[in-house]
Amino acid sequence: MISLNIFSKCPYNGNPKTRLKGLLNKEERSFITLHMLTNILDEVSEINDDFKITLWVYPRLKDNLFHTIKRKYKINIRQQQGSSLCERMNNCLSLESSKYEKTILIGSDIPSLTKGIIMDAKYALLKKDIVIGPSIDGGFYLIGIKGSYENFIDCMEPIDIQNLKDKISSHSLDLELLQELKDIDKPEDLLFI
């Protein structure tokens, strides 16, 4: 069994996509966030039974939306724990990797992320210790690990692909990179939706 974890801000009380404030109002940013979340949930709902899927929500999961999502997609829903994105990712990866042989964490703001790419990550973890899906802006949209997680994401450094690759290399672990994709952070990124 593989733990597949999706990170998302709550579209309604998480103040999503703040870097789009100059272009979109809060309702529009909420709409886009919900659209991208629904898109990734539709993709992962088609994945076979060797995945345990959990949606990790920030800042609160006390919204009727999440009851509907849980029923519709038959997934687990948990609240992200930690004061920063880095800390929340580390907490999720540590917890899930203590229970599962393979753990994958993805973002919910990657419109081109497909179940095929997630399956590529699954197969990469058969041969490699770590798999990363790099994003065009220098970050990453997916990290997968085999075995226990050792806090490769350093909260004292920028969360970017190069720092992550350096940290993994320093632990002498095998790494495979997936195809590069685009996440939605800035106004010009909306052309990718």
Image (spheres, helix red, strand yellow):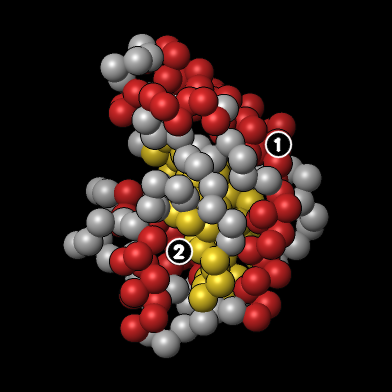
| Residue at 38% over, 14% down | 24
Q: Residue at x 34, y 83 (%)?
A: 170
Label 2 packing within 10 angstroms: few (<14), some (14-19), many (20+): many
Along the line of sight, the residue nearer the viewer: 48 or 186: 186
- Which type of secondary structure does the marked residue at label 2 adopt? helix
> Which residue is identified by label 1?
42
- Quadrant in which residue 152 is drawn: bottom left
Cα distance between the residues tagged 2 and 1: 23 Å
Q: Is residue 39 left or right of residue 164?
A: right
Q: Looking at the rendering, in which quadrant would you find the C terminus?
A: top right
The answer to whether 78 appears left or right of 100 in the picture is: left
Judged from this view, the residue extending furthest toward the left is: 156
- In front: label 2 or label 1: 1
Q: Nearer the viewer, residue 11 or 99?
A: 11
Q: Amino acid at mark 1?
A: Asp
Residue 41 drawn above or below residue 171? above
Q: Quadrant of the N terminus?
A: bottom right
Give the percent coordinates (x, y) of residue 187.
39, 24
Residue 163: percent from left, percent from top: 31, 66
Residue beneath label 2, please?
93
